[in-house]
Image (spheres, rainbow, N blue to C red):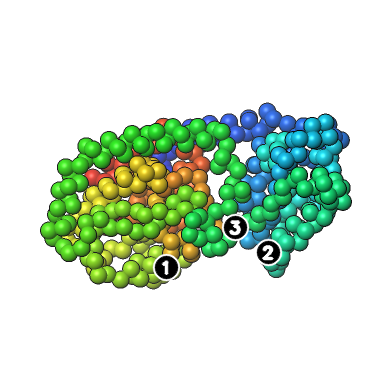
Amino acid sequence: MNSPISVLFNKLQPSLRPIKSLKAAHLASELHALPRCANGCEFGYCTVMAEPWFTRVLNLERKRTERSRKPFILVLLDLEGARELNGTRHRLIEQVFAAVTSFMRETDVIGWYRNDEVLGVIFTELGKAIDPQTALDSISAKVTSALRTEAGPDKSRLIRVSCHVFPDDWAATKPGGRVDSALYPQQHSNSRWLQSAGKRMIDMGGSALALVLLSPLLLMIAAIIKLTSRGPVLFRQVRIGQFGKQFTFFKFRSMNVANNSKIHEEYVKGLIAGGSDVGGNGVFKIQNDPRVTTIGRFIRKTSLDELPQFWNVLKGEMSLVGPRPPVPYEVDVYDLWHRRRLLQAKPGITGLWQVTGRSRTTFDEMVRLDLHYTEFSSLWLDLKILLQTPVAVVAGSGAY
């Protein structure tokens, strides 16, 4: 029997399969066309990975940690300050390499985090029993000491050393952001930047046009809400955006002002944990929620309550297409692999989840849909999702 997630994927498979195969083939050909070892081989060693390979290994190491729960440490050695050395810079790189490899294990990995500028070392699998902060302090002290020994105190001061542990402690970095961006270098690649720039242009144009064209409808909904229930027209809520950054999320208010948010908090936490207390129906929203007003039930069913989010898109906090923006108490109970849905794309008004599963899917299936979108996203896929969104809204399937 096909799983629910397989059935949902089949709806968009004609468009997703070519994207997936082309991107996978492109990545494989791009990597195999490049030497695995960096130009550092001229110094007599062939164990320094080239930047694309090192980035790939770092990505795989993150995924391994998500499964094994064994943290790893990434050490970055920034050689930008050593450019003034000119002819002796190559000698300094040799000394840095000798310093780091003096205490590296066989399973650790060294390579260019940023070509010819930042050298990276991945200290893999620290073990569950080892305190990450203790290991971080120990490795940092070893790197500093080894650099002084190999390069001398003057040259070692030209090298900026930073240490990063994965999984990063999101709770410790509230409220400005939750993510250590150094652990995700692929997010800042040129190809992703160009795609993001094109997506942002479409977001700005699309959201501005929607706000202008839909302004009569927006005013009418606002008036009806004001006339039928007490309280503000708009509902404001803190949500978590890309890289864990918090922002104020706007919707038309569909609930009574005096309501207990603990009802939803407990429901969502139970759903993520896979508990039986959520009814086992795989619905992300509470059905027959007693807090919802009469007009609120209609605008939720038709997704008209989502229209103010075009303002979030215009401000750059959201995108037209992307994963659903979570609330903080939801993120607090995320498993490690769930976090990936917040890293590779801005949250969106609509997305792959909304046009395929919407509220009918389980939480894990929703996350898999989001990850599938973020991994194989393209402007063409965004257009397909945008075109399918009105159909999903009119059908109203999975909306509560």
Q: Residue at x 59, y 46 (%)?
A: 184
Identity, as a three-letter code, of the amino acid under mark 3: Asp
Q: Locate residue 352, reporting x and y percent.
A: 39, 44
Q: Quadrant of residue 141?
A: bottom right
Q: Residue at x 75, y 45 (%)?
A: 159
Q: Locate residue 234, reporting x and y percent.
A: 25, 55
Cβ atoms under marks 2 and 1 closer than 8 Å: no
Residue annotated with mark 2: 133
Q: Residue at x 26, y 40 (%)?
A: 211
Q: How many residues crowd around disc 1 within 10 Å: few (fewer than 14), some, or many (20 or more)?
A: some
Q: Quadrant of residue 399?
A: bottom left
Checking the image for residue 330, the label placed there is none
**In terms of sequence position, does the residue under pointer 2 or pointer 3 come before the other?**
2
Could one spot residue 100 in this view of the protein? yes
Q: CA distance from mark 2 to mark 1?
A: 31 Å
Report the front residue among 152 and 375. Answer: 152
Cβ atoms under marks 3 and 1 closer than 8 Å: no
Q: Is residue 264 left or right of residue 243?
A: left
Q: How many residues crowd around disc 2 within 10 Å: few (fewer than 14), some, or many (20 or more)?
A: few
Identity, as a three-letter code, of the amino acid under mark 2: Gln
Q: Which label lies toward us, 3 or 1? A: 3
Q: How many marks?
A: 3
Residue annotated with mark 3: 168
Report the front residue among 192 and 141. Answer: 141
Q: Name above or below for residue 25 compared with residue 271.
A: above
Q: CA distance from mark 2 to mark 3?
A: 11 Å
Q: Secondary structure at mark 2?
A: helix
Q: Name above or below for residue 87 compared with residue 216.
A: above
Residue annotated with mark 1: 270
Report the front residue among 385 and 85. Answer: 85
Identity, as a three-letter code, of the amino acid under mark 1: Gly
Q: Name above or below for residue 129 compared with residue 77.
A: below
